[in-house]
Image (cartoon, rainbow, N blue to C red):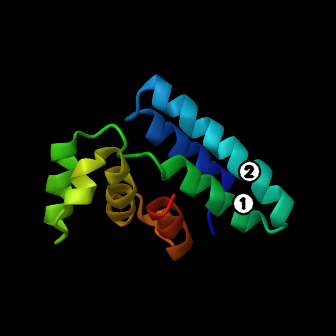
Amino acid sequence: MITLVQIEKLRESVASILSEKRMKHVIAVEDMACHLGSIYFQDEEVLLLLRAAALLHDVTKEWSTERHAAFLKEHGITPTAMDLAAPKTLHAKTAALLIPEQYSEYASDEVISAVRYH
């Protein structure tokens, strides 16, 4: 089970790699995820998973198109023409792939799916 202390550490970790502008967005998403989650779920564990997904959803957003493409290729995925035509969407794929590698304690199917399909 994820703890609030882990979420606080994750927030600090993500803040250390994202720009201030991007981090403000991520915190706003985390706040909204908590707000909406509390309407639909009473389970604290679910709310912590929502927080983790919110914090991780843009973890690769500031990568260059080239870095996204290279990372996908390293994982056996060839970016499609549509991916490259809309490179701002690549971060959903790369962030989902990065979670098990760098944020393994949050690598549940629910978090990875939420990040992948946000």
Where does the image place residue 102, in percent across and percent down from the top left? 35, 57
Res. 90 mark: none
Left or right of 50? Residue 63 is left
**Between residues 40 and 12, which one lies in front from this camera angle?**
40
- The answer to whether marks 2 and 1 mark residues whose Cβ atoms lie closer than 8 Å is yes
Res. 34 mark: 2
User: Which residue is painted at 26% across and 58% down in the image?
Assistant: 82
| Whether residue 6 is visible | no
Query: Number of marks in the image?
Result: 2
User: Which residue is painted at 50% across and 75% down in the image?
Assistant: 109
Res 8 → quadrant: top right
Element assignment for label 2: helix
For the residues marked 2 and 1, what is the alpha-carbon distance in whole angstroms? 6 Å
**Between residues 89 and 101, which one lies in front from this camera angle?**
89
Toward the top, the furthest residue is 20
Where does the image place residue 32, in percent across and percent down from the top left? 71, 45
Going by the numbered disc 1, the residue's amino acid type is: Leu
